[in-house]
Amino acid sequence: MPEWRRRQILLTALGVGSMASGLGSALRRSTILSRQAELTTQFLNSPQAVEEAVTRAIEGDIEATAEVQRILSGLNLTAPPNPYERSISKTLILASRLATEQYLTGKFNLRYQGAIDSLPSFGERLSGYMQVASIKGPDMVTAERQVPLNERGKQDPLLAGINLIRSRIQGVASQALVEQWSYPVYWGFVLTCPQHHILVLRGTQRGHEWLQTLNAKQIASGDVPTLGFRGRIHRGFATIYGRLSNAIIEAVQQLDVHKPLYLSGHSLGAPLASLAALDISQKVAALRKNLRLYTYASPRLGDPTFAKAFNGIVPNAYRVINQADLVPNLPPTSAANLVYVHAGEQWAFTSAAGDIGPNHFISAYRHAIENEMEQRAG
Amino acid sequence: MLGTIEFVPDPRMITGRLRAADTEERVQQRLVGRYEVVQEMVVDYALGLAILGLFRDLLTPVLVITVLLVAKMIWDIARLWRFAISFNPIAVLGQMANTVGACAIALLAWCSLELLGAIVPGIECFALSAALMSGAWTLGAAFNTFFMNGFLRSHSRISLEVNDA
């Protein structure tokens, strides 16, 4: 086939194809628009449908509340067989504070070995306990240091000028490299005394970090190789726990299985302690009946299927919350096709300090628990 | 009386120079001609791929056929340059960079039309077509230069012979 003829054929085919494609696209769009217009007209011609839509929009919050109530009433969690122990709760909230101090001390003092008796909040209440192990794992937040990029440019006027133009073009006022590094940090510890054991996991420092959990995705058991469970749970908590699982199981395996093991945590430490209880019940089965879970300011961990199954595996679970704290209300019960509920018996108090942080900090919880302000929810 | 010395050119020398100039010109014409033939072929391949890109709802088969057609295009370019692959490291590295660049240009063309489609509805249906066309064109042009480089290196003795003559 001669060259010019092939080119002609190709150009003709491209022209015809483009026209067909463009016309097809325009036709599709026009069909959609006319269908939309038709539906709008149909809708507006039906006063009942318009009225229903307006009512639905106005009463949307009522429906949302009803949906939350439906979810919660469908839960039917059984009450713990053992009573809530105020004295142990006082010890556990103190231990939660110590877990935070342990983490902070280890983060800045790299020679620190994890002993809790040297920490500022260590007191009489814990003097009868022996520390069996410290739980170490990767830090959730990597350390960052900003390194300015334009240091060398300052010596060369032309380069500095170009850098200035470049930074203005890109709309970046202060260009910087971010140097990141991470090293193992303390996540908690295990204590023992003649009567029982305690495992405490630490939480986060800032209350507003929990705002990030609003868009919490869920994962199923198959996505977490180290942990088996029913239903779906918060992806972030499962990921963090996955990195700590081995250290926790290793520490717990040293314990006497005939004594009760109290697991506890504040804030992020609460869902981690819940997952630890679940993990221990599977991997150290002899301890299963002796597990007691006390969580403070716990965010929601999983869906109703998970909560029901968890309630069956760890029946002695207690959840202490400050009614003024935002974190226990996160992630929302129902949002973006995801459902989150709490497991465990709720014990609540109210301590409103006027902001997210102070309402959430361990100090607020510790003060309330020391004064026995928490009451079982009706 | 001073005698004048007349320069009488040797007829053999004149013929030799004319022949050399003639040969050099013919070699250049042949090279340019070969380059243009490949260029035309690359444009045809690009047009063919642009037609193929109009079937954007059949993305997987379109991409499979694209890969096959691009491979065929490279083979045809190489064939027209007598498989004169240049082993010059700079040319090889340059060709690798050009291949990455062709993919980047295809991606950029696709992104541009998809973005433009947000402002001018309907334009986005040519995004794949534009991507395949610009990518194939750029890649073909790069391979044309690459194989011409190899051809020139392997046939450098022709030019040496021309200069010597």
Image (spheres, helix red, strand yellow):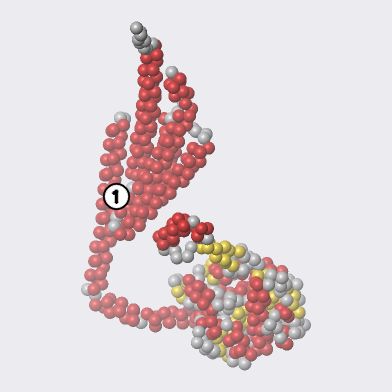
Task: State the residue in front, A269 or B36.
Answer: B36
Q: In the image, residue A371 lies at what x, y percent?
A: 62, 92
Say above or below: B163 vs A15: above
Q: Residues within 10 Å of mark 1 (few under 14, many from 20)?
A: some
Q: Can see residue A253?
A: yes
Q: In the image, residue A231 lies at what x, y percent?
A: 54, 70
Q: How many marks?
A: 1
Please indicate whether residue A24 sits to the left or right of residue A141 in the image: left
Please give the chain letter of the residue carrying mark 1: A
Q: Where does label 1 land, which residue?
A: A21
Quarter of the image that includes the N terminus of chain A:
top left
Q: Quadrant of residue B140?
A: top left
Three-letter amino acid code of the residue under disc 1:
Ser
Please indicate whether residue B150 sits to the left or right of residue A349 in the image: left
What residue is rendered at 65% in x and 72% in y?
A108
Q: In the image, residue A58 lies at what x, y percent?
A: 34, 81
